[in-house]
Amino acid sequence: MTEATPGRRGGRQLPTADELRIWRDFIETTAALGSRLESRLQGDSSLSTGDYSVLLALSEAEGQAMRSSALASHIGWERSRLSHHLGRMERRGLIRRQECATVPRGAEVLLTTAGAEAFRGATFPHLRAIRELFVDALTPEQIVAAGEIATALKARLDDLRTQ
Amino acid sequence: MTEATPGRRGGRQLPTADELRIWRDFIETTAALGSRLESRLQGDSSLSTGDYSVLLALSEAEGQAMRSSALASHIGWERSRLSHHLGRMERRGLIRRQECATVPRGAEVLLTTAGAEAFRGATFPHLRAIRELFVDALTPEQIVAAGEIATALKARLDDLRTQ
DNA sequence: TTAGCATCATTGACACGTCAACCGGTAGGT
DNA sequence: ACCTACCGGTTGACGTGTCAATGATGCTAA
C-alpha cells in the first residue's frame, strides 16, 4: 500500500472513466469547500484563512510573538509568501514587525491588540462553519475515512517529492 | 443524513479536537494535491489547470467553439473569471474570440490550432499525474469512499447555498 | 414611445501565490 | 585577510481569483 505496485490493476497508465469522475468530484468539491469556508470567515470577521493561520500561531506562541522563519515553518508556508502576507497584515494593523534583538538579521512578528481581538472574534464562527460544512456533512465513519484518505494522499505526495 | 440533526452528537456547536485535526489534514492535503497537480501540468505542458479546463471543453465542443457564457457554466466558473482567463489565453494564442453571428452581444470562443496542439500534448501527462498522485495513492475502497465523501460534501454545500 | 430591467460580456481594483532575484550578514576554507 | 557559500528576509513581476461597476443590447410594461 505504501509502495505502488505498478501492475496492481493491470498496468494501466491512465485512470479509468470512473476514477476520473471521482477525481473531478473530489478535487472540485474540496476546492469549493475551501473557498466557501474562506468567504464565510471573510463575512464573519473580515479575515482570510491565511490571516487566521497566522493569528492562530501567534496567539499560541510564547509572548504572542515569533521569528518570521519559525512562523513560516510552523504553518508550512514559503518565506516569500509569508513576507507578502505579513506586509498586508501589518498595513491593516493586525501584526507588527521589529528587528530581533537576539538573532542578527532576524525579524520578530508581534501580535497587536487589534490582531488578538480580531482573532478572538473570528474563532467561534470559524469553528462553527467547519462543523456545518464538514463535520455535519459526513457520517462519523466518513470522517474517519476522510482522515485516512488525507493521510494516504499526504504520504504519496511526500514520497514523490523526495524521490 | 441529508437533513442535519442538530443534536446528533450531543448538540455541540464546535468540532472536537479529533474532528478538527482531521479537518486540517483533509483540507491542507487536498489543497497541496491540487497545487502539486498544477505544477506538474505546468512543467509538462506550460498550461495551468484553468487552461486545461477551457481547452478540454472547447476540444469536445461542436466545431471546437463555444459561446462564452455556455463555456462558463459548463466548467462552473464565474463569467468575470472566465473573461480574465480568456484574455490571458488569447494573448498566448491558445484561443480566439469573435463576435457571435447568431446572438447579439454574444462572444464566440474558438480553439486555435496552437491551443488544440497544447491540449493534445498536455492530456497524457496530466492523466498520468492524476493516476500517480490520486488513484495510486489510495486503495480501491478508499477511492469509492472519496467519491462518497465528495458527494456528501457537495450536497451539503448545495443545501446551505439555497437555504 | 420610452422608462425600466435583465442579460452578456468586459473592466478595474485589489488580495493572494509562486518564482526568481536580491540584499545584508555570518561562517568556513584557503 | 579574502573569497565564497549559505541563511534569513524582502522585493518585483506576473498569473490568478473575487467583487463591484460599466457598456451594450434586447424585452417588457406604463
Image (tube, coloured by chain):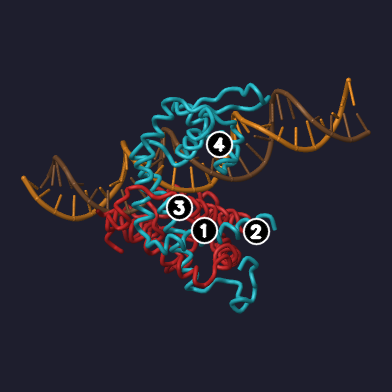
Chain colours: A cyan, B red, C brown, D orange
Q: Residue at x 37, y 62 (%)?
A: A139
Mark 3–mark 2 distance (CA, rounded to whole Å): 28 Å
* Tag in front: 3 or 4: 3
Q: Quadrant of the N terminus of chain A?
A: bottom right
Which chain's residue wears label 2?
A
Q: Residue at x 33, y 39 (%)?
A: A44
Instruction: Respond whether the residues carrying marks 4 and 1 are from the same subunit.
Output: yes
Position of A90 relative to B15 (above/below) = above
Q: Is residue B138 left or right of residue D1?
A: left
Mark carried by residue B18: 3
Amino acid on which the number 4 mark rests in the picture: Leu
Which corner quadrant holds the C terminus of chain A?
bottom right
User: Nearer the observer, disc 1 or disc 2?
Assistant: 1
Q: Secondary structure at mark 4?
A: helix
x and y, in percent, of residue B48 in the image:
54, 54
Q: Mark 4 highlights which residue?
A: A82
Chain letter for mark 3, please. Answer: B
Distance between the alpha carbons at the discs numbered 2 and 4: 25 Å
Q: Are marks 2 and 4 on the same chain?
A: yes
Q: Quick one: SS at disc 1?
A: helix
Task: Give yes or no for contact between labels 1 and 2 (Cβ–Cβ under 8 Å).
Answer: no
Q: Mark 3 is on which residue type? A: Asp
Q: Are marks 2 and 4 in contact (CB under 8 Å)?
A: no
Chain letter, disc 4 residue? A
Which of the numbered marks, if any, corresponds to residue A150? 1
- Residue A78, quarter of the rendered image: top right
